[in-house]
Amino acid sequence: MSENMTCKIAYIVNARMPTERAHGVQVAKTCEALGKAGEKVELIIPRTFNHITEDLFDYYGVDRVFTVRAISSFDWRRLGHFGFMLQRLYFAVVSVLYVLVKKFDAIYSREILVCAYASIFKRNVVFEDHEPPRSKLSSYFILLKFIPKKVIVARNLSSLYKKHNIKNYIIAPNAVAVEEFDRTKSDRGVWRSFGISDSTPVVLYVGHFYKWKGIYTLLDSAKMLRNASVVLIGGTVENIDAVQKYVEDHNHTNVYLKKFVSRKEITKYTKSADVLVLPNTAKEERSKLYTTPIKLFEYMASSVPIVASNLPSFKEYLRDNENCLLFKPDNSESLAEKVSHILSNKDLGVRLSKKAYGEVKEHTWEMRAKRILKFIYDH
């Protein structure tokens, strides 16, 4: 297909949309960027119950430049793991049959089963790979070789691909809508609802409260940051209670928790903090090697100084004392020391945040979409 022609792209994702999980943002922003590039994009999702009733476009704040189609599925939860696997197989078959009937030019998906099945019938199939599975690796590598095209989000996956002779892929990490942060003003008043005074420095973490995200390292650092407030935003029903209990059991009086909030609110909180923290653990492979969190780029776009774990997964984007400060992973004392250094040295914080902001402009959703489209058209 010529590059000046419009491509009809099916983006297939087997997930509840909208969702409070980060992959929802990534999917919505990717579809928007592909649509803005002039392509005809249809997001295909399973028809399922969703406690979030807000319109997908309003929820993510994306333009209506793509369409959404919910197709047949079923509730697998009562059947446990067997139901989960059965639903994955069912959705793969139904979604691929749908795109074949509708005659899409390209199929793009984060679902390896969808891409493998679609590859039987079409060659213009692209699998977006975020991390290797924690089991059944041999099947994973077989399917990767069968799927014509791969987009790697985590750069370190390329070493795994080379080791197993997986070909025809590009690296396209996550991105950020810089303009959303540019038009949002810092507002110290947002912390008053927590009971935090305007003069108290705020150390902020945004994201899920999973253990592998390193939040317990951040919590343990709070006792060494007595002159600051440590705020964590993004907890869901499944995990916020355990974190709240940990805070109470350890008498962390300067820690504040907040459940998941809207994208617009998150941007304001992020812009209004004094230090932003990425405390990911080095004890799990997905965190150490393969995570490229959207919030990393959002932190960089916020013009607020960053303190992050010194991990291989971050090293492509974060450099110690250049655009952030890095601490020893899983070490609360090291984390507290780095945060304190920034809080007591405003000039350092300004220098680091300016550098990060300048560099993140190379990681927009639009630039990422153009790279993916070139890959689709040229191969």
Image (spheres, rainbow, N blue to C red):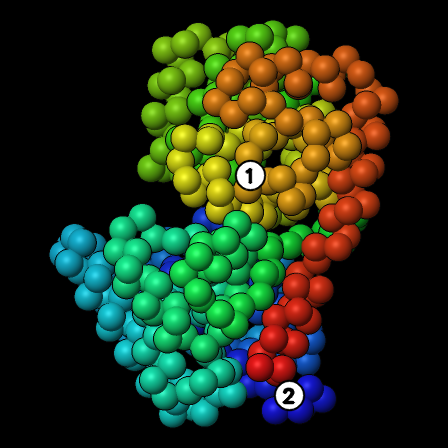
For label 2, count other residues whose C-alpha is less than 10 Å away and answer few (under 14), some (14-19) or many (20+): some
User: Who is closer to the viewer here, 324 or 27?
Assistant: 324
Q: Please tell me which residue is depicted at 62% across the width and 39% down the height of the picture.
A: 315
* SS state under label 1: loop
Q: Is residue 159 above or below residue 268?
A: below
Q: Residue at x 61, y 11 (%)?
A: 225
Q: Residue at x 38, y 17 (%)?
A: 246
- Name the residue at 36% across, 88% down: 121
- Where residue 310 sits: x, y (%)? 58, 30
Of tags 2 and 1, the one toward the viewer is 1
**Which amino acid does the dot numbered 1 rest on?**
Pro
Instruction: For label 1, count other residues whose C-alpha is less than 10 Å away and answer few (under 14), some (14-19) or many (20+).
Output: some
Instruction: Tell me the tag on residue 312.
Output: 1
Q: Position of residue 320 (x, y in %)?
A: 70, 29
Which of the pair 39/164 is nearer the observer? 164
Give the Cα distance between marks 2 and 1: 38 Å
Q: Where is residue 360 drawn, in percent x and y?
A: 74, 48
